[in-house]
Each structure stands twice: as C-alpha cells, then as structure tokens.
Amino acid sequence: DVARRVAKAGFVAFAPDALHSMGGYPGNDDEGRKMQGAMDRAKIEQDFIAAAAFLKAHDLSTGKLGAVGFCFGGYVVNMLAAAIPDQLNAGVPFYGTPAAKELRPNIKAPMLIQLAELDKRVNGSWPEYEADLKAQKVDYTMHMYPKANHGFHNDSTGRYDKEMADLAWTRTLEHFTKHLSA
C-alpha cells in the first residue's frame, strides 16, 4: 500500500519483501518478527542495498534515490543512509533504530526522522543518533508524534492514528519532492 501511494504521488516505487525467501510477509507483525529473527541480518541488508541499486538504475528513475520504511524498514532506511551514502538522496525512517554506530559518520542524505512519542524502545536510541547526525552536519528533521504508538502509520492495527499518519505522510512526500525531484 505504501509503494502504491508513493507511485501515485509520481515517484517510481519498489517494495522489496525481506521475507520473500520464507514465503513472504505472513500478514501479522508478530509472526513476521519471528520469521525475520530466523534470517541472516547481513543478507537482508545486502538484499536491500541491491534493491536500492536496482531502483536507482531503473530506466524510469531520475537517478535520485529515496527510501521510506517502517519499524524494521525504518532501520533499513537508516542503514542505507549509512551503507550507501553516495547513492541515497533522501531518507524517511518511521520509528526505526539507527544504523550501526561505526557506519553513522557516512550519512550524507537529508533525513526526515518520524518517531512516536509512546515508542520508548526506539526513542531511547534517538539522543545518541541525533548527536551523531549533528556531528556529521547531516541535514535532518525529526518529528515526534504526540500520543502516538510505534506503528501509528499502519492502518491495519489498533495502533493506527489517522491524524498523525496523514501528517507524517504529507511530510514524507514533501521531503521526497524537495530532494528527489529532477
């Protein structure tokens, strides 16, 4: 659904499924997390780096690459920003943990960080991540969505917050338009 909305906004969109080799996303986050935990994280990261390269080189691409992700996908956006800094032009991680500390000095892309006020686990990593972004003079903006839970953008769960999700999505598209338009 997110890829469809990105495409509808005029961008080339690609939504790789990290769980494809295990039959794909099972339809609920709890089972998905268990499946993901059984996978080789380095392989998952390399698959997403390959997907980014594929999209950036696609015939319909402008040559600029943006990434948006949610939860583990938010981590993937942060990882891509650090692992392929010369290829990523804009990143929007929703409630994602940061990339490995030793990789963070590589980040160059403008980042729009979307966090949920009630998400204590992910938010606990924000102060150190922000310090690293500031130290590298990364162009970033962080929005903390009040009274929102981890997963507030996912309209298939009870954590969905339509008002916050709509606002965050508007900001996401504005960020991509600013940094990815030809």
Image (tube, rainbow, N blue to C red):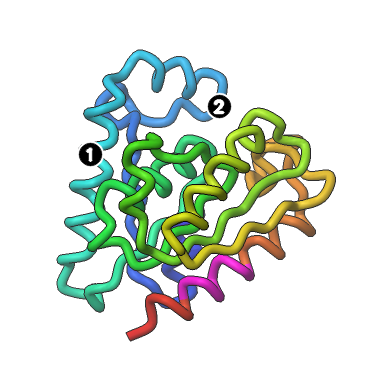
Q: Main secondary structure of the magenta part?
A: helix
Locate residue 125: give its quadrant: top right
Crowd rating for badge 1 (residues with CA inside 10 Å; few <14, some 14–19, many 20+): some
Residue 53 percent location from the top left of the image = 18, 56
Residue 164 percent location from the top left of the image = 75, 56
Q: Residue furthest right?
A: 147
Tag 1 residue? 47
Q: Is residue 118 above or below residue 139?
A: above
Residue 60 percent location from the top left of the image = 22, 75
The answer to whether 79 appears left or right of 8 in the picture is left
Q: Which region of the structure is painted magenta?
A: 170-176
Q: Secondary structure at mark 2?
A: loop
Please tell me which of labels 2 and 1 falls first in the chain: 2
Quadrant where the C terminus is found in the figure: bottom left
Tag 2 residue? 28
The answer to whether 72 appears left or right of 51 in the picture is right
* Residue at screen point 38% across, 64% down: 109
Q: Amino acid at mark 1?
A: Asp
Q: Which-is-in-front pick, marks 2 and 1?
A: 1
* Residue at screen point 51% across, 50% down: 93
Q: Amino acid at mark 2?
A: Asn
Real-space Cα separation, disc 2 to disc 1, in angstroms:
22 Å
The answer to whether 28 appears left or right of 16 in the picture is right
Locate residue 48: give its quadrant: top left
* Residue at screen point 45% across, 63% down: 138
112 or 157, nearer to the observer: 112
* Residue at screen point 22% across, 64% down: 56
Q: Is residue 122 above or below residue 1?
A: above
- Residue 112 belongs to the span the image colors magenta: no
